[in-house]
């Protein structure tokens, strides 16, 4: 179980610990977040194993969370079908914190303000651990994709372009 100093813990880390989920935390210097691909290049991490968290709003006005490999794009039609929406659109960056409680580059499906419908790309199942944001800039969490799915009450599905 990863242990950090109390004041360095994010909400996501506290939730993982509370639920007895095995995870590892890594930190890095981050003066300016560009995107996940740039960060993976900087840290020497695999694009396929590093996942970004995207928040979308459906025609119903409900929010949905998609956890996909950093170099991939969500196929809006596939994703809408998976979550039972007619259409989806990305939540504007300026609204991310109000909707999730997290800022761009620090957004994770773990511990958002509300538990939204969460879909993790099925490729995650091919890894013992995936890398997701740790809940703030400069922090990553390594955990089993099945643990992420269980904790977020999510599902695995093919939601990327291609």
Image (cartoon, helix red, strand yellow):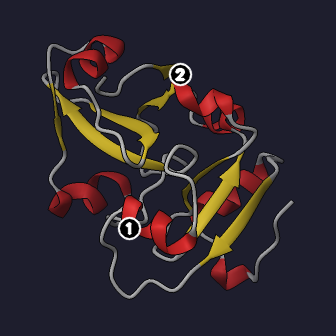
- Specify whether residue 154 is in view: no
Identify the residue position indicated by label 2 in the image.
155
Looking at the picture, tell me which residue is in the foreground, 50 or 42: 42
Viewed as shown, does residue 4 lie left or right of 103? right
**Mark 2: secondary structure:** strand
Figure check: 93 above or below 53:
below
- How far separated are the C-alphas under marks 1 and 2? 27 Å
Which tag, 1 or 2, sits closer to the chain's start? 1
Viewed as shown, does residue 95 lie left or right of 83? left
Looking at the picture, tell me which residue is in the foreground, 1 or 101: 1
Viewed as shown, does residue 5 lie left or right of 36? right
Viewport quadrant of the C terminus:
top left
Q: Which mark is residue 38?
A: 1
- Give residue 5's position: percent from left, percent from top: 76, 83
Rendered residue at 43%/50% (across/down) = 52
Figure check: 151 above or below 53:
above
Residue 132 sits in quarter: bottom right
């Amino acid at each position: 179980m990863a242990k950090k100093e109390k004041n360095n813990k994010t909400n996501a880390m506290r939730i993982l610990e509370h639920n007895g989920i095995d995870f590892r935390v890594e930190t890095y210097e981050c003066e300016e977040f560009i995107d996940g691909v740039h960060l993976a290049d900087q840290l020497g991490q695999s694009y396929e194993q590093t996942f970004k968290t995207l928040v979308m709003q459906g025609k119903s006005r409900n929010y949905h969370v998609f956890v996909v490999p950093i170099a991939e794009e969500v196929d809006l039609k596939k994703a809408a079908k998976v979550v039972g929406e007619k259409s989806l659109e990305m939540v504007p960056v300026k609204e991310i914190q109000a909707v999730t409680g997290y800022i761009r580059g620090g957004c994770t499906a773990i511990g958002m303000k509300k538990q939204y419908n969460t879909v993790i790309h099925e490729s995650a199942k091919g890894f013992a651990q995936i890398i997701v944001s740790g809940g703030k800039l400069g922090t990553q969490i390594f955990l089993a994709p099945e643990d992420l799915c269980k904790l977020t009450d999510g599902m695995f599905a093919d939601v990327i372009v291609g």
